[in-house]
Image: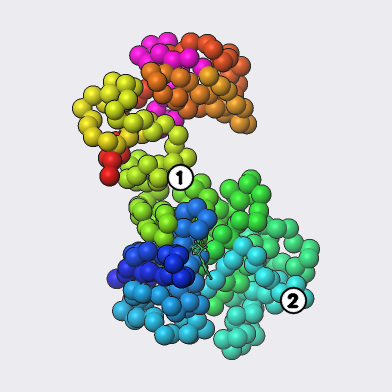
Amino acid sequence: MPALTLSEISRRYGSTVAVDRASLTVEEGEIVVLLGPSGSGKTTILRIVAGLDADYEGEVTLGELDLRGLPANERDFGLMFQDLALFPHMDVFGNVSFGLRMLGLPKEERRERVASLLELVGLEGKERRSIYELSGGERQRVALARSLAPEPTLLMLDEPLGALDRTLRESLAAELRDVLKSVGVSALYVTHDQEEALSIGDRVAVMRAGQVEQVATPSELLQAPMSEFVARFLGYQNLLPLDGALARRLAPEAEGSGVLLVPEEAIEIDEKGDVEGEISGRRLRGRSSDLWVAAEGELLHVIVPSAGAEAWDAGESVKLEIDRKRMHLIAGK
Ligand code: ADP
């Protein structure tokens, strides 16, 4: 039985439809990510699940229990936010044990629980550190330990890594996933960052204008996005209209008004390639570089290693080898 079920949830603010018949389940121990652009309804869903917003249509159930009317403080849910609001006047121990004190846990048990949580998040022995002495990443770990301490039935995380820089975010995302999986907590995680979503979620729900557009595992999403919106949101740039010359040649059997997704990973510059193009631009991006290649009326995005990329200047002719097996057809609506 799913830990949490959302059935046909809608929420309106005046004429704005913030959430539009959204349905979703979170299985026991599963991490489900709500991924979508700003304004797509992610926070509204989280607030409804948390019990902070009762003005919704549809049903939210925990196991078999309908949560409507159950106050936020009786839900046993944990929350972790971007502006994590640690208590600055308390040390690490005080922060992590805060919820345990509220639960009335005796001091010795609190000590043990805090010690094992700090070990879990890689801060063992740091009980007496002041919050001011911690780096941004360490504070995030304290916040995670604090939200896990009361052993919530569901942990909700709202852009928990949003305030950190890119490199730290990537390493913490992997760690965060490991911690959540080792505890086995069911989690609902909100982000607008596709890389973060794909590295943390067991499943990812892509939100668009209040609706859940697609829910799938990261691998399924990447291999078979069901709409152009999802594909673009995942970062794919080569979506060729089926009635164009290139798509017709690459996928002659395809019909209709859809688009052909050609993942960047499927394209290589190769003398033996059968697609002729001309470089129209190049941009350095660390160890890899972006090339844009004009070919048969389309502009293809190609990723190449930066080492040696200066060989490809605008105006030069290249041949592209495209792995047909990695292409994916997205049907039109
Ligand atoms: P996200 O978290 O994906 O950025 P939100 O759930 O915050 O999206 O918002 C969804 C939509 O609902 C947006 O159009 C937003 O402007 C609107 N909205 C959210 N909260 C309120 C509110 N309290 N009053 C009016 N409109 C709101």
Which quadrant would residue 245 be assigned to in this image?
top left
Q: Does the rendering let one see residue 182?
A: no
**Residue 270's x, y, as percent?**
43, 14
**Residue 304's x, y, as percent?**
52, 24
The CA distance from mark 2 to mark 1 is: 41 Å
Q: Give the magenta part as a residue range.
A: 263-279
Q: Which of 312 and 268 is in front in this view?
A: 312
Side of 271 where 118 appears, left or right: right
Q: Which residue is drawn at 48% across and 85% down?
A: 71
Which quadrant would residue 311 be assigned to in this image?
top right
Residue 221 highlighted magenta (yes or no): no
Helix, strand or loop status at disc 2: loop
Where is mark 2, residue-wise? 90
Which quadrant would residue 332 be assigned to in this image?
top left
Q: Is residue 201 above or below residue 27?
A: above
Q: Which of 257 and 183 is in front in this view?
A: 257
In this rendering, which labeled residue sits more in front, label 2 or label 1? 1
Question: In the picture, which quadrant includes the N terminus?
Answer: bottom left
Q: Dot 2, how many residues are within 10 Å of its Cα: few (below 14), some (14-19), or many (20+)?
A: some
**Residue 34's x, y, as percent?**
45, 58
